[in-house]
Image (spheres, rainbow, N blue to C red):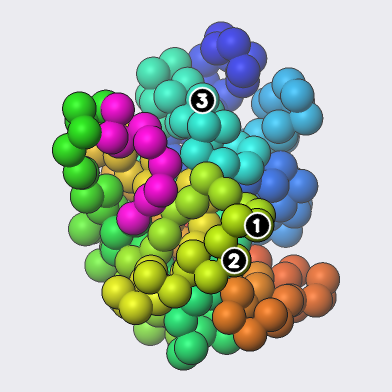
Amino acid sequence: MSLHLGAQKGQIADIVLLSGDPSRAKYIADNLLQDSYCYTRIRNMLGFTGTFNGTSVSIQGTGMGQASLAIYVHELIQDYDARTMIRVGTCGAIHPDLKLGDIVIAQGACTDASFNKIHFQGMDFAPIPSFRLLRQAADMGKALQTPVHIGNVFSTDLFYAENDPQRWKIWADHGILCADMETAMLYTMAIKAKVAALSILTVSDHIIRGDECTAQEREKSFLEMAELALRIAT
């Protein structure tokens, strides 16, 4: 039993979807998993286990930001032997070709966070996903006729960058598709622990154009993203 999850051994599957929003975790469990149950409510960071196509899968809320995600990923790997971890999150588009509701698969993650600089003693590290999961996601997107965009993302520690509202431009100039707040940490930790990880993101707003998804659009696109992740994982 870990400090922040509190689940018993065997209650969490070795395949785990990660959702920053615990309410999204519940929504996915209610709509896509069979026989799901809640194994943790600590700090209202809900976690659920059920089955998808006969395979046991867990969905865990992680909160916002890389520091919060790191706590849950650490415990899932070290205390519950998670071996496949797929983030199902949201992102803000900074590429003109992206539209609201589009799905982005992160083939790499840049970051402004200091954790990799600290860990690698000032050197740069390139956080990348499991190629197996990345390839399966691309193939599954075609099979499900779900258009996906594959490219690099920017994992930031700042949601409100009031001192530099145009900071996204340098990333857009280098082909970054979107910004999120967790992917770089997930990939770095997964590589160290030798587990498979992938980040699948739905565009919920467009930073350049100022567009935002409605609640109905978010609901539909989130389930498309979650089903894609579940099919890849199982």
The quarter holding residue 171 reads bottom left
Above-or-below relation of 209 to 104: below
Q: Is residue 111 magenta?
A: yes
In front: 226, or 212? 212
Residue 137, can we see it? no
Residues at marks 3 and 1, CA–CA distance in whole angstroms? 27 Å
Badge 1: how crowded within 10 Å, few (<14), some, or many (20+)?
A: few
Mark carried by residue 1: none
Residue type at numbered disc 3: Ile
Asked whether, in this view, residue 32 is left or right of residue 156, the answer is right
Residue furthest toward the right?
215
Mark carried by residue 165: 2
The residue that appears at 40% across and 76% down in the rendered structure is 172
Above-or-below relation of 96 to 190: below
Residues at marks 3 and 2, CA–CA distance in whole angstroms? 29 Å
Disc 1 is placed on an element classified as loop
Q: Is residue 26 magenta?
A: no
Residue on which disc 3 sits? 71
Disc 2 is placed on an element classified as loop
Asked whether, in this view, residue 53 is left or right of residue 153, the answer is right
The residue that appears at 60% across and 74% down in the rendered structure is 207
Residue type at numbered disc 1: Glu
The quarter holding residue 50 reads top right
Asked whether, in this view, residue 92 is left or right of residue 25, the answer is left
Badge 3: how crowded within 10 Å, few (<14), some, or many (20+)?
A: some
Q: Which residues are magenta?
A: 110-118
Residues at marks 2 and 1, CA–CA distance in whole angstroms? 6 Å
Residue 2, can we see it? yes
